[in-house]
Amino acid sequence: MGNTFGNLFRLTTFGESHGKYIGGVIDGCPSNIEIDFESIQNKLNRRKPGQSKITTQRNENDKVEFLSGIFEGKTLGTPIGFIIKNKDAKSKDYLHLKNTYRPSHADFTYQAKYGIRDYRGGGRASARETVCRVVAGAIAEQILNQKGIQLFAYVSSVGKIKLKKHYQDLDLSNTYNNIVRCPEMSCANEMINEIKKVAKDGDTIGGEITAVAKNIPAGIGEPVFDKLSATLAKAMLSINAVHSFKYGFHNRDISSAKGSQVNDVLINSAGVTETNFSGGIVGGISNGNDIYFTVSFKPVSTIMKDQKTINKDGNKIKIAGKGRHDACVVPRAVPIVESMMSLCLLDYCLLNKN
Amino acid sequence: MGNTFGNLFRLTTFGESHGKYIGGVIDGCPSNIEIDFESIQNKLNRRKPGQSKITTQRNENDKVEFLSGIFEGKTLGTPIGFIIKNKDAKSKDYLHLKNTYRPSHADFTYQAKYGIRDYRGGGRASARETVCRVVAGAIAEQILNQKGIQLFAYVSSVGKIKLKKHYQDLDLSNTYNNIVRCPEMSCANEMINEIKKVAKDGDTIGGEITAVAKNIPAGIGEPVFDKLSATLAKAMLSINAVHSFKYGFHNRDISSAKGSQVNDVLINSAGVTETNFSGGIVGGISNGNDIYFTVSFKPVSTIMKDQKTINKDGNKIKIAGKGRHDACVVPRAVPIVESMMSLCLLDYCLLNKN
Amino acid sequence: MGNTFGNLFRLTTFGESHGKYIGGVIDGCPSNIEIDFESIQNKLNRRKPGQSKITTQRNENDKVEFLSGIFEGKTLGTPIGFIIKNKDAKSKDYLHLKNTYRPSHADFTYQAKYGIRDYRGGGRASARETVCRVVAGAIAEQILNQKGIQLFAYVSSVGKIKLKKHYQDLDLSNTYNNIVRCPEMSCANEMINEIKKVAKDGDTIGGEITAVAKNIPAGIGEPVFDKLSATLAKAMLSINAVHSFKYGFHNRDISSAKGSQVNDVLINSAGVTETNFSGGIVGGISNGNDIYFTVSFKPVSTIMKDQKTINKDGNKIKIAGKGRHDACVVPRAVPIVESMMSLCLLDYCLLNKN
Amino acid sequence: MGNTFGNLFRLTTFGESHGKYIGGVIDGCPSNIEIDFESIQNKLNRRKPGQSKITTQRNENDKVEFLSGIFEGKTLGTPIGFIIKNKDAKSKDYLHLKNTYRPSHADFTYQAKYGIRDYRGGGRASARETVCRVVAGAIAEQILNQKGIQLFAYVSSVGKIKLKKHYQDLDLSNTYNNIVRCPEMSCANEMINEIKKVAKDGDTIGGEITAVAKNIPAGIGEPVFDKLSATLAKAMLSINAVHSFKYGFHNRDISSAKGSQVNDVLINSAGVTETNFSGGIVGGISNGNDIYFTVSFKPVSTIMKDQKTINKDGNKIKIAGKGRHDACVVPRAVPIVESMMSLCLLDYCLLNKN
């Protein structure tokens, strides 16, 4: 359980951080779709380690190799198998973790669940797994784009530096013009400085990503337990280090809002509303307005400081701060959020065809 | 799609707000469990309408009738079918909505998805559906209790009135001693007054519920897409009016935290940590500490004020504020949050038996 | 597990043979379908006990009551809950079975799996459960009919009396003109006599049902594990007493056929073939020709003779032949086969819409 | 849809016959299992092409490469990804099929469903896919063996040559001592001669495989729709060329049996019965006796004779008999039947742990 996402467009992933390969299988991809391979690779490059001064220096080119399901450039409708080589895994760097559980890492919980773990680089719990989500998400996004749907995500906060403007007031095409993935340059610079400062201290910091989907037609979603909002929440919370999800309501506090202030008045039969506190989803089903939500990431647990912990015998020990890591995860997480959003939305579009 | 929750302990619900009955089927309930029917009814009473001055006056006794799966007081392991009569549905009160889409209600989205809807009382989109979740959740909770697991939920904010203390500093056994379901009496009184004031204005207000699970053993959860945290998020966002989910990190802002401040240091081989910013779940799997999270509810969309909207022909009209409703949904939502938490946790405990 | 069938058109059933009600939930029914209730009841009447001299004398009117999902005669797209009362359960007749396991009944296996069972009338293992399949199947069939698809099933053997003609040479509209449900009257009479003779001997006998689906368009089906043929096989083997499934190949022995004799030559681009040994499904996907298959039922295990068995303490005892039962199950199983075929085919038609 | 099998032990496969690789992902494999790689390869060798005079001469060594989920020889509980190279694909041999639909092959149906197909070697519809099932099945079988469960399969007929003895009267350890996989040497020789004769004629022939599982404890299975017998039927019908499934009843005709003749009398509280017409499964749940069933395969559709057919423009053409193929599929299908049986039984054992 746990390694498959989606109902009709379904991604299954496999692979440990320091295994030979990491990969996945996409089942249910519509047939006869011409694949833009360059665009997939671009998306992977935006997630890959070693891409800038503020990301981990692990060096992976993250070239994806497709093994099936695509014939003469087009999807066959059969499963798309793919693999990506783990090239720069420095497993020796992790030998000291063989018998140690790092604070706030999944070392202890995987050991508790499975009675065994691949201790190298976090094994299956590593965010390296998300490379596979980006492959599938990039394909899903291509299909959504063909339906006229546009997806965006960007960094909206790093530590205490928060982007005050809401997404409608931003030029989202600027997002990838800077290494921190914030569409407003002045704010981006502050964020970059903050990450550098934190990194210099050997520490890490949290952040937030906001995501937007435009041109989703009204009527996409499922009732009750599988509300579109609920599935987006699950998708986002499945990303490593994510601790919260909020949709709609802009920067506003949800719980102190009054009905008279936040009810969205319908103005035409396409479902357009005067305001959009609902975030484009009502009763779990899209209403034709923009869907938007914000996701919070905790600071990376690996820090360059000595920490107390225990070993597998339960003895208290000290663990040295070493290894490669990101001081802030959000810049590289932007394409991951986009990808999980793509997987949800395409799956729900397909579900709506009955 | 959409009306089933869970993998091995699985609830399917059916029913519209003003249909003859609402009901459900629980499949996968462990066999040979002695059912405490009184305790199920108590839980239902805590959710039922008309229970106090601050809830809607719709009057339902919400007596559940079990149709199968229980024999001589014990579960058979076969599906448990159950129904609850809708007694006090005043469908006439909704006739004016036949051709009207209320602001921020699911009228428009259901119509967009299905091309038809039961306009009476919100139909399938009504929170009346959650009565079925409470039946199943109450059974799940009994089974969890037998494993020593304890669940709690309480109102932690209504509008701007926020309970500052964290759950460890509260006596959670007080929660049901007042009608607003807040364990601290002074805060509860403020909340009750706020709700009364808002109701008098013909308005509605949002709120928050915090939930806690104690004595969950380490190792419960699934990796990657089905993280326990992700499934809890989905479960919570599937509840009507919920717009956000956050686990761990107490009242703290996640995104401005630093790794050195919030890493939880392990102190023994049972997984106990010095602090619990992780909220009891690391890498999607329980670590043996308390699981806790907070859920935000938007204000109820039905208000006692005139509002602009459109009818099904797309013409702009005015809709009068009438009908029965809650001015604040959180007091009645406490057993619903408890129930969805129970369904998740029991399902994941059963998944862990391989 | 076990009580749900289908992917997009999904039936969940509940209920024991002697419980108060038996029922089910259909999720995923397309919306805006006008339901022909009389036609559902007609189908139920063809399955119900006590309908003729050759069926069990348990007297149930099997009136279905719909609780949700249908509004002003049309489907809402929301779950259709329904119940049927068990009126003529004579539980006293089963008291002697409380501690006894009947030969070739599921008494022992349910006890082994669940550690508890409802011993009255076979409990959940009773074929009474199939009444719910007929409700859902009848609705599915109405939707298939609107697509031009026609379904047929008929008794093709009882004991050694075998209908030699193949379905193309029969007038299938005659099936329900006799109580044994065989479209050829002379053969039907032989079958009726055989059942009467066996019943008089206090014994029971097996039989076969052949089913045909016409006008299924080419391209319906899924590859590999979920082949349409595989899902039909599962659907049929899920019916009580069914022990085999065979599709295509008419009355011919599959294993002794030669490729040159049974390859179906395509004659036009609609997929029409000269012969139809394939049974309308190739590689798990429909080819546009008739789908047909045959299902074999073992003799009913309840016989009117004394039998040896054991009680729950493992002691050898003798069990008297009593209780109401069918001497041959196939006449009443015809609408059940039709229903399971409908559920499969509609689900697969819906799956094909991507 | 269609490329995943199982609930808790779940196999997803991908790959076309002439793609670069074929592979799969096993999710839900219990952790801490020591894998016997040699035994997996042995199983693959029994399925691989080119292994004897009576199989296709395509030459594949079918070496499986594991990419994840196994660490220091033991399973991690995380997904096991694996690939197998397609080495001897002679795609040029299939160029003439680009625009042609072969009789009784899935060329036409895949084109009808997907609007595109990989015409080389049958693409995804090729039985080459089953190599992945054998990898997963071999792992599942190792786990079942550790529980004391033993699985067997053997060829019980080729054309008109039928093995008359039932499985209890055979020494099943002899099965793999001859190239046709029939445990009785004299019968095996007849079968081998029959296949050679048919092959010399440029024709193909059908056959049957019988399978047996010993030491399955009573109580394994699910009720109603997911009966163990129903899932075995689906698993078997999902194998290329299989057209029928029958469990229990030895070589006997099911439909002409009488209840008094085939009821299995229980003789002790372990569930042992005097006879075993039930085939070890009653009401969908194992009763502790041997599970056995028989599966029929149609003759391979590729024959070495000219055949009439149509091309994609609907024009009638003649297709020449060429390409490599098996004259009879059953010798190589024995490990495939064993594998699908393993996948079912392990999955159901895991489901039974609640």
Image (cartoon, coloured by chain):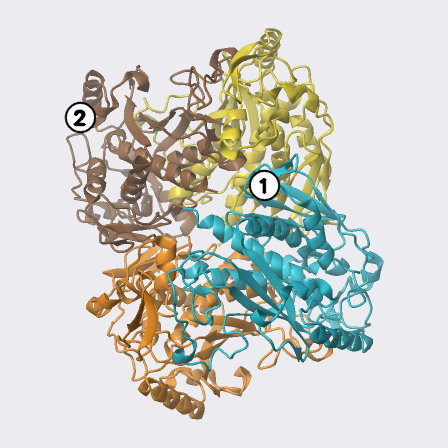
Chain colours: A cyan, B orange, C brown, D yellow
Q: Residues within 10 Å of mark 1 (few under 14, many from 20)?
A: some
Residues C206 and B258: in front is B258
Amino acid at the residue labelled 1: Ile
Q: Residues within 10 Å of mark 2 (few under 14, many from 20)?
A: few
Amino acid at the residue labelled 2: Asn
**Which residue is farthest front?**
B315
Q: Position of residue A305 (x, y in %)?
A: 80, 76
Residue C184 in view in this figure: yes
In this rendering, position of residue B266 left or right of residue D262 = right
Q: CA distance from mark 1 to mark 2?
A: 52 Å
Chain ID, mark 2 = C
Residue D168 in view in this figure: no
* Disc 2 secondary structure class: helix
Q: Position of residue C120 (x, y in %)?
A: 26, 48
Q: In percent of the image, x 37 and y 61: which residue is there?
A: A269
Where on the picture, by quarter, is residue A149?
bottom right
Chain ID, mark 1 = A
Q: Position of residue C45 (x, y in %)?
A: 19, 38
Where on the picture, by quarter, is residue B168?
bottom right
Total marks drawn? 2
Frontmost of labels 1 and 2 is 1
Residue on which disc 1 sits: A33
- Compared with B42, D286 (above or below) is above
- Compared with A244, C219 (above or below) is above
Residue on which disc 2 sits: C177
Q: Position of residue A23 (x, y in %)?
A: 68, 48
Where on the picture, by quarter, is residue B36?
bottom left
In this rendering, position of residue D84 left or right of residue B132 = right
Per the rendering, the mark at residue B202 is none
- Compared with C98, C159 (above or below) is above
